[in-house]
Amino acid sequence: MDHDPTLTGSGADLPLAAADGQRPPGPGDGNHGSAELDEPLIRVMALHALFYCERLFYLEEVEEIRVADDAVYAGRTLHEELRQAEEDGGEWSSIELASRQLGLVGKVDCLRRRDGAVIPYEHKRGRARRDGKLPAAWPSDAVQVSAYGMLLEEEIGRVVPEGRIRYHADNITVRVPLDETARQAVRDAVARARQLRNSTDRPPIAANERLCIRCSLAPICLPEEERLITRNRWEPLRMFPAERDAKTLHVVKPGTRVSRSGNQLQLVPTEGEAIAVPIHDLASVVLHGFCQITTQALHLCAQQGIGVHWVSGGDRYVAGLAAGAGQVQRRLRQYRALSQPGVCLPLARRLAMAKIETTLRYLLRATRGTDRNSTGVARAVRVMRESLHKISRAEETAIVRGHEGMAARAYFEVLPRLLRPEVPAEMHPDGRNRRPPRDRFNALLSFGYALLYQNVLQAILAVGLEPALGFFHTPRSAAQPLVLDVMELFRLPIWDITLIGSINRLQWDPQADFQVTRGRVWLSDPGRRKAIDLFEKRLCDVWRHPAIGYSLSYARLIELEVRLLEKEWTGQPGLFARMRLR
């Protein structure tokens, strides 16, 4: 390795064109209209993503979805180590470059002077491509270092003959000539990037499935799940996380104040010591009843993308705050799709049938070995089966809603039959009542549904969809229609089954866990804590998805179903609402 001094400082410190009279091919030599000059600059790193996969470019640069996985952090670590090591030896310089004519902006890894020329360097953790036995640059790496070369030429006014890429896994440096072929590849990439950026449609997934394996956005793109639709007997690789990597903080005790202390939330009760919770451990914060949160704590949650939700003392979902609630392209696609009856009706049919089939299977399983005729279960089963038949042939969403409502009424009529004889009479439901609930069972049911509403809303906002634009429910209250739509898949498996099981195990104290007044019942503080504990444990339970073929927690399943819903208009439709209780 030679030790010619590396250029240092900003662009103003670099040598100018007058030194030898050379003039590089100027970016102004190409055809650039005024409209192109008004375009936002494209990151050079984005060209690397574009060559790797157009879907990846679109997600990162247009929809601004970026996920830093282990590979990303490893790359950052490599660059920091190299920077520190070579700065100590006087061999490192990076510089930010931008060109309105080229339409590019970027920060080159390293500049060095070689044989009188200034050369941009790129450092890569992986191995070089092999052209026979000779090492070569990958196309995405080549276009990246070529773009840096063209930016550098405009900055210093001199020809940059080549770029160099150091592949650290091979300990090899590959030279990339900055010839006309390389320049045209950069210009074509910029043109394609602009074309994609002006579109509201996501490009298709990569044809080469091997590109998806190490992609940090695979849990959002879900390429393996799309291939289930187009390829027979395809067995998807798991790229979607099985467990949630953060938890929900429920603040229950009345009067508790949530404040900020550095990168922690401080829970300060009216009596007792404060509790510190690291912000990186949280996915959301739920404030129950008369709890408070400071502006500073809200800012911290917003900066970290942590949702904050409020549930009333009467166990009703009130409001939520989520940072980065989605980009315009995602919502435009959603609005365009859900404005079409040809999209909404099939989705409504599939959703209603999934809910009824799951309910029917649970009802048959829970009443196995009993006299279903004497308990009315046989009639409820008959109503559900008739509803399924009629929904499959319904030609209007309103008709689908009507038959789903009939099946739901039949289910709630026989719900008390699922409780064991030893369950106290106070815990039996009197039909389905709410706003306000008039018995203990319905108080628990409504509280669990409020928690479920919060989790579904959080998932919808995380995916970037508009919760007010649904396809099944109509906006008849403050509740968001799309949240109510997705909730239908999870009411029974997440909360109904959990609640009925806990009542049959006599886990509830009819006196201590509830507050009862004339015409209204709600949970006491101990009852609310018990319900939250049951709900959060249920979210951690693992379940095998029958359509996707792999297991994941219910917390992750909610997000997965929302992403599969978005695929109904951004990729391959047909996987949403395929889940069924076995």
Image (spheres, rainbow, N blue to C red):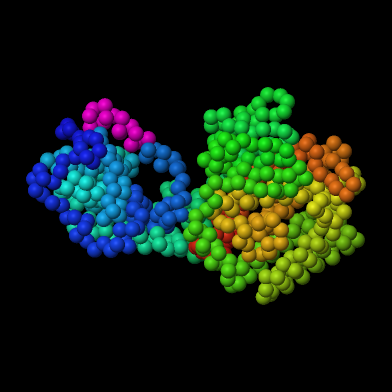
Image quarter (top left, top right, bottom left or bottom right) of the N terminus: top left
Residue 540: x percent and y percent? Answer: 64, 43
Residue 258: x percent and y percent? Answer: 64, 33
Residue at coordinates 19% horizontally, 43% vertically from top-left? 119
Residue 217 vs residue 422, the one in the foreground: 217
Residue 267 vs residue 539, the one in the foreground: 267
Residue 79 counted in the magenta span: yes
Residue at coordinates 74% horizontally, 58% vertically from top-left? 359
Residue at coordinates 36% horizontally, 55% vertically from top-left? 40
Instruction: Find residue 582 and report its image quarter.
Output: bottom right
Residue at coordinates 35% horizontally, 58% vertically from top-left? 39
The magenta span reads 77-91
* Relative side of 539 to 98, left or right: right
Residue 59: x percent and y percent? Answer: 44, 54
Q: Is residue 359 visible?
A: yes
* Relative side of 578 to 168, left or right: right
| Magenta span: chief secondary structure | helix
Residue 220: x percent and y percent? Answer: 50, 52
